[in-house]
Image: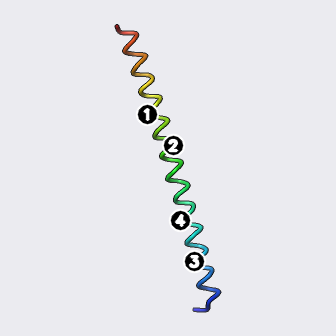
Amino acid sequence: MTQMDQQKQDDNKKYKDEKKKQRQERLAQQLRANLRRRKEQNRKRFQDNS
C-alpha cells in the first residue's frame, strides 16, 4: 500500500468518525428535547388533574 492510499484511508476514517459523532450528538439533542417535552406535558397533566 502506498502512502497516498494510506492517507486516503485515514481521511475516510476521520470523515466517518466525524459523521458518527455528529449523528450521536443529533440523537442526544433529540432525546433531551423529548425528555423536556414529556416533563412539561406531565406537569401540565398533573396541574389539570389537581
Distance, label 2 to label 1, CA atoms, is 10 Å
Q: Are marks 1 and 4 in contact (CB under 8 Å)?
A: no
Name the spot of residue 4 as percent of width and height, x first: 65, 86
Name the spot of residue 25 as percent of width and height, x first: 52, 50
The residue that disc 4 covers is 17
Q: Is residue 7 above or below residue 32?
A: below
Q: Residue at x 57, y 60 (%)?
A: 19
Tag 2: amino acid: Gln
Name the spot of residue 36 as percent of width and height, x first: 46, 31
Tag 4: amino acid: Asp
Distance, label 3 to label 2, CA atoms, is 29 Å
Tag 3: amino acid: Asp
In the picture as drawn, the residue positioned furthest to the bottom comes out as: 2
Q: Which mark is residue 10?
A: 3
The quarter of the rendered structure image containing the N terminus is bottom right
The residue that disc 2 covers is 29
The residue that disc 1 covers is 35
Marked residue nearer the N-terminal end (3 or 1): 3
Q: Is residue 18 above or below residue 34?
A: below
Marked residue nearer the N-terminal end (2 or 1): 2
Residue count near mark 3 (Cα–Cα under 10 Å), binned few <14, some 14–19, many ≥20: few
Q: Are marks 3 and 2 in contact (CB under 8 Å)?
A: no
Which quadrant of the structure image shows residue 8? bottom right
